[in-house]
Amino acid sequence: GGRATPVMSGFRGQFHYGGLHHLATHLFPDFDESQLIPPGQQVRVLLTIPLKHWVDWHQHQLMEGMKFEVCEGLRVVAEGVITRLQVD
């Protein structure tokens, strides 16, 4: 698995948990906005989800410590663990 090419903030991969795929924008706060992040690098990511989707679905499903995957189509390109939830 994994990506063959780098990504940068604004990447719109599918956030996968609980058997379902959800769209999320990936922001990488430890990198400049235009900086490319090479494949295989461990990073901190902020996933932004539209508020309506949070209210309709995610607020009762996501929990700190929960594992998730990032997918492109059916291919898993990254894995992660939720360390904090924040609603703005």
Image (cartoon, helix red, strand yellow):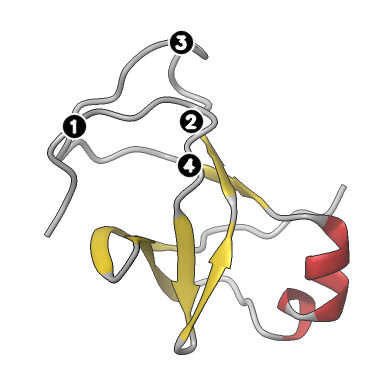
Label 4 residue SS: loop
Q: Is residue 14 above or below residue 34?
A: below
Label 1 residue SS: loop
Identity, as a three-letter code, of the amino acid under mark 4: Val
Residue at label 4?
45
What's the distance in space between the residues labelled 1 and 3, CA to CA?
Answer: 15 Å
Q: Where, by quadrant of the figure, is residue 50 drawn?
A: bottom right
Q: Is residue 76 above or below residue 66?
A: above
Q: Where, by quadrant of the figure, is residue 46 drawn?
A: top right
Marks 1/2 in contact by CB < 8 Å: the verdict is no
Identity, as a three-letter code, of the amino acid under mark 1: Thr
Label 3 residue SS: loop
Residue at label 1?
5
What's the distance in space between the residues labelled 1 and 4, CA to CA?
Answer: 17 Å
What's the distance in space between the residues labelled 3 and 4, CA to CA?
Answer: 15 Å
Looking at the rendered structure, which numbered label has been put on residue 55? none
Q: Position of residue 55 (x, y in %)?
A: 87, 73
What's the distance in space between the residues labelled 4 and 2, CA to CA?
Answer: 5 Å
Camera-nearest residue between 24 and 41: 24
Residue 36 is left or right of residue 9, and the answer is: left
Say which quadrant the N terminus sits in: bottom left
The residue depicted at 78 percent of the width and 76 percent of the height is 59
Marks 1/4 in contact by CB < 8 Å: the verdict is no
Q: Between tags 3 and 2, which lies in front?
A: 3
Q: Where, by quadrant of the figure, is residue 22 drawn?
A: bottom right
Mark 1: few, some, or many residues within 10 Å (few <14, many ≥20)?
A: few
Sooner in the amino-acid sequence: mark 1 or mark 2:
1
The residue depicted at 32 percent of the width and 17 percent of the height is 36
Residue at label 2?
28
Residue at label 3?
34
Q: Position of residue 84 (x, y in %)?
A: 61, 57
Q: Position of residue 78 (x, y in %)?
A: 28, 56
